[in-house]
């Protein structure tokens, strides 16, 4: 995992410089930027596809983790990948932005236990999943 000081730096690196005007904070992703990130998913030379963003606070606040991979998801066409949340990200997710994938939060590692699927960006994941996610499935 690569950490960046700002959301803009993360997007610039993961799109190989094709998108260099993202906001400094992931909190300010608008629909136009989300569409551009989705459109960049098949761009030759791009280091990674932006799949989604998870946040430690509701309303897209707090720390943000941009989920990336070498290819996108089929949004609803089966599980593309699974991520276990370790360290400070375990039991810390309160809101999320979907980009190239739907996100499914699970309350135990290895996508087990109670889960909730999110097909669109969500400013609050709900009481059942708030600060409970230990793994994520990318759909």
Image (cartoon, rainbow, N blue to C red):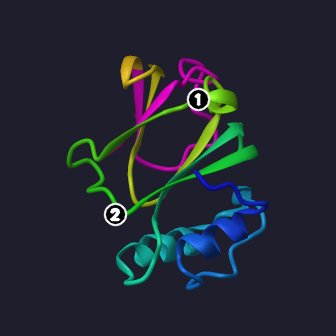
Image position of 89 (left or right of 23): left
Query: Which residue is found at the position 68% from the left and 54% from the top?
Result: 3
Q: Is residue 60 visible?
A: no
Examine the image and state in which quarter residue 112 appears.
Answer: top left
Distance of mark 1 from mark 2, alpha carbons? 23 Å
Query: Which residue is found at the position 58% from the left and 26% from the top?
Result: 126
Of the residues under marks 1 and 2, which one precedes in the sequence? 2
Looking at the rendering, in which quadrant would you find the C terminus?
A: top left
Query: Which residue is found at the position 60% from the left and 20% from the top?
Result: 127
Do the CB atoms of the residues marked 1 and 2 lie less than 8 Å apart? no
Say if the magenta span includes residue 111.
no
- In percent of width and height, residue 75 lies at 30, 53
Which span is picked out in magenta? 115-139
Check the image and name the residue furthest to the front: 1
Check the image and name the residue furthest to the top: 113
- In percent of width and height, residue 69 lies at 42, 58
Query: Which residue is found at the position 62% from the left and 56% from the top?
Result: 2
Dot label at residue 71: 2
Dot label at residue 86: 1
Crowd rating for badge 1 (residues with CA inside 10 Å; few <14, some 14–19, many 20+): few
The answer to which of 125 and 38 lies nearer the viewer is 38
For the stretch drawn in magenta, the main secondary structure is loop
Examine the image and state in which quarter residue 43 appears.
Answer: bottom left
**On screen, 104 above or below 34?**
above
Marker count (numbered): 2
Say if the magenta span includes residue 116.
yes
Crowd rating for badge 2 (residues with CA inside 10 Å; few <14, some 14–19, many 20+): some
Secondary structure found at label 1: loop
Image position of 94 (left or right of 104): right
């Amino acid at each position: 995992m690569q950490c960046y000081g700002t959301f803009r730096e993360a997007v610039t690196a993961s799109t190989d410089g094709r998108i260099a005007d993202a906001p400094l904070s992931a909190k300010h992703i608008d629909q136009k930027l989300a569409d551009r990130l989705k459109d960049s998913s098949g761009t030759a030379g791009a280091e990674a596809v932006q799949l989604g963003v998870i946040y430690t606070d509701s309303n897209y606040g707090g720390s943000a983790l941009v989920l990336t991979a070498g290819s996108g998801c089929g949004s609803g066409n089966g599980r593309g990948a699974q991520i276990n949340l370790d360290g400070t990200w375990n039991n810390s997710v309160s809101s999320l932005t979907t980009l190239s994938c739907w996100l499914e939060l699970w309350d135990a590692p290895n996508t087990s236990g109670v889960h909730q699927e999110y097909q669109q960006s969500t400013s609050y994941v709900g009481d059942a999943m708030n600060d409970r996610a230990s793994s994520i499935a990318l759909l």
